Image: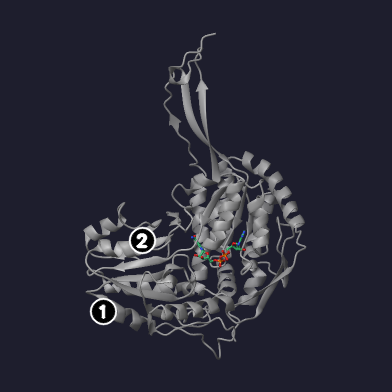
Amino acid sequence: MADFGIKEALAQLGLKDINNGTSTGSVNFANGEVIESYSPVDGKLIGKVVASTREDYNKVMDVATTAFKEWRAMPAPQRGEIVRQFGNKLRELKEPLGKLVSYEMGKSYQEGLGEVQEMIDICDFAVGLSRQLNGQVIPSERPGHVMREQWHPLGVVGIISAFNFPVAVWSWNTALAWICGNVCVWKGSEKAPLCSVACQNIIAEVLKANDLPEGISCIVNGDYKVGEYITEDTRIPLVSATGSTRMGRIVGAKVAERFGKSLLELGGNNAIIITPTADLKVVVPGAVFGAVGTCGQRCTSTRRLIIHESVYDKVRDAIVGAYGQIKIGNPLDENNHVGPLIDKDSVNTYLAAIEKAKAEGGKVLVEGGVLEGEGYESGCYVKPAIIEAENHYEIVQHETFAPILYLMKYSGDVENAIELQNGVAQGLSSSIMTSEMKEAEKFLSFAGSDCGIANVNIGTSGAEIGGAFGGEKETGGGRESGSDAWKVYMRRQTNTVNYSDELPLAQGIKFDL
Ligand code: NAD
């Protein structure tokens, strides 16, 4: 089988057969178990990463804590300059890193490149922001007084990330955390550990070239137990955790117990409402890319289509027809649309979900199943499925991280569709397809979608970094990336300064001595 330039990409990213998974740059401490990273693309071993022990982790924290003292003293625009250089390095290495993402995680090469582009974009955003970490000046009620607000760095930010965006999610957090004056300790997913080593190699080179402490960026590796070192650690004031709702429930509680802050980016159950005036030219690619892109493994993947009964048959037939065009295979081959699921556990979850949907009364419109034979040796390639279902089915209420799309009807007004759309426990992304201004505005109003992301005439997936990203309810409530998401990486301080010769008390309280 063609190599698609993987060997060369690994070499360009400084990856070896065995890699140190606990790193502050040149200083590596890994003494834990060995994680073998197998590609879901062809089932081959890509490389090994030595995971972190508790002692390794503590050494990393010492280096990071020391680095913080120097980094926070550097003016924010100078920190931005380092992020700018990091963004440029990513431009140089976009192709090899995009290839690694595709090969280790299984998304299409185009989506791998897109993920690195997001990293570049957030770096650019962070560079500009490094001159805009503005506080406010607030009128004081007391004469000769001034009140203002400042934003200070927090310290060591812990980042725990999921397998499906193995590089971008880290950069959304870290680029902002850095310009805010924090240092970062990142535990990537144990399902894509080489991606974290590759990113660490890139930033370590930038820090070294600038003669900066390498503890500004650190990685640790391993499963949830290594994640727990971070969540339990009182030296970490903010834990940003991306992953399943199951994980977020545990992490959120652990961090809250010690009064730490957490930024939770958890599962979604995203729907598109398709109204009678929806434009099929937009609906079909929007819904199909949303449902099958990244093999249904985006937090924003489209899981449900809520279609008005008057256009149901037409929309269903168009979507089912489009599924017939989908090419499934090696994601590095740009002729294919859909790559594999991440591993066989995920394949089993996908199969079980289809069975459950059928048992609850679902009618299969496009059959799922596991692909076998040449090119599918890893056992992780599945067929995207479409099932006619009802919103209240247990299985529909849960996020299955696989390409299963549920179709359901609504009748009457758009309010009925909005009720179905909101009638799940998650609240990440949502969209409406309509040419009616009133329907669109209702969907975006306080009585409309209850999600963190609500779109009109585009699908649920594929957010830009300029907006705040995240969702409500079981999606965790966190926001990262654009807008004013930077504020979560800083602590707010209110200052009142008296430049008069008197000491008037607030609220006019008298205290005469
Ligand atoms: P996962 O929850 O299995 O793992 C995510 C990360 O959390 C991993 O690094 C894992 O080691 C760590 N972890 C798990 N349990 C932990 C614990 N008790 N303490 C500390 N760390 C722990 O998720 P996954 O399978 O890698 O990713 C898929 C999930 O991520 C989906 O639910 C998807 O919707 C979600 N996701 C959400 C967003 C978002 O922005 N909302 C983005 C990407 C993925």
Q: Residue at 50% of width from left, 55% of height from top?
A: 122
The image shows residue 111, relative to residue 27, as above or below, that is below
Q: Quadrant of residue 450?
A: bottom left
Furthest residue in direction bottom, as rendered: 373
* Nearer-N-terminus badge (1/2): 1
Q: Nearer the viewer, mark 1 or mark 2?
A: 2
Q: How is the image coloured?
A: one colour
The x and y percentages for residue 221 are 68, 62
Q: Residue at 74% of width from left, 57% of height from top?
A: 54
Q: Quadrant of residue 66?
A: top right
Whether label 1 lies within 8 Å of ligand 1 gets the answer no
**Residue closest to the eye, 186 or 14:** 186
Total count of labels: 2
Q: Are marks 1 and 2 in contact (CB under 8 Å)?
A: no
| Quadrant of the displayed image that contains ligand 1 | bottom right
Residue 471 in sight in this render? no
- According to the image, label 2 marks what residue? 422
